[in-house]
Image (cartoon, helix red, strand yellow):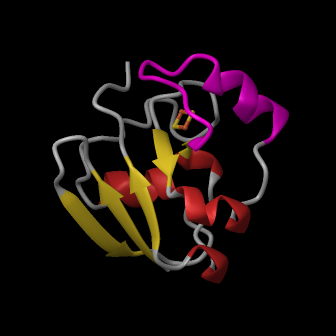
């Protein structure tokens, strides 16, 4: 699944992730610095905050209660397009998705 991460600096990284990988893992494995993933993907740190391309929001599964709770704790501005990258799994439905990353994660 092709995913593009765009850092706050404008630097863009496009990767091809195996299905089932979460998008935080995909960022860490590919040296994308705008995602920290401090809790290892257990929805407990909010340092994998990202902004999803608005036009693709409908392609994503809705956020769980746990994710919505953690989104209360993001360091950067929370927007309608805010998600936690560790809670999104690579799948064909997400192909070509662009994630914009906030300038701060903690
Ligand atoms: Fe900690 Fe996503 S990596 S909430």
Q: In this view, does 11 lie above or below 95?
A: above
State which quadrant residue 29 falls in: bottom left
| Residue appearing at x 36%, y 55% in the figure | 27
How many badges with numbers are in the image? 0
From the image, which quarter does the C terminus lie in? top left
Residue 89, quarter of picture = bottom right
Q: Residue at 64% of width from left, 48% of height from top?
A: 87
In magenta, the rendered stretch is 64-82
Residue furthest to the right in view is: 65
Image coordinates of residue 53 in percent, x first then y, are: 50, 58
Q: Residue at x 47, y 43 (%)?
A: 50
- Judge left or right: residue 73 versus residue 16: right
- Which corner quadrant of the image does residue 3 belong to? bottom left
Is residue 97 depicted above or below 50 in this figure?
below
Give the image location of residue 20, x and y in percent. Answer: 62, 70
Ligand 1: quadrant of the figure: top right
Residue at position x 56%, y 33% from top? 79
Residue 43: x percent and y percent? 64, 33
**In the image, is residue 72 part of the stretch drawn in magenta?**
yes
Where is residue 96 drawn, in percent x and y?
A: 46, 77
Q: Is residue 32 magenta?
A: no
- Extreme residue in the front direction: 55
Left or right for 68, reference 24: right
Q: Nearer the viewer, residue 10 or 85?
A: 10
């Amino acid at each position: 699944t092709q995913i593009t991460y765009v850092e706050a600096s404008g630097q863009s990284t496009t990767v091809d992730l195996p299905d089932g990988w979460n998008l935080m893992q995909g960022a860490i494995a590919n040296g994308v610095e705008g995602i920290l993933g401090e809790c290892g993907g257990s929805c407990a740190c909010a340092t994998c905050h990202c902004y999803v391309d608005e036009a693709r929001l409908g392609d994503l599964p809705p956020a769980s209660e746990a994710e919505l709770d953690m989104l209360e704790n993001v360091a950067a501005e929370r927007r309608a397009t805010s998600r936690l990258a560790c809670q999104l799994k690579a799948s064909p439905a997400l192909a070509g998705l662009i994630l914009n990353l906030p300038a701060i994660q903690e």
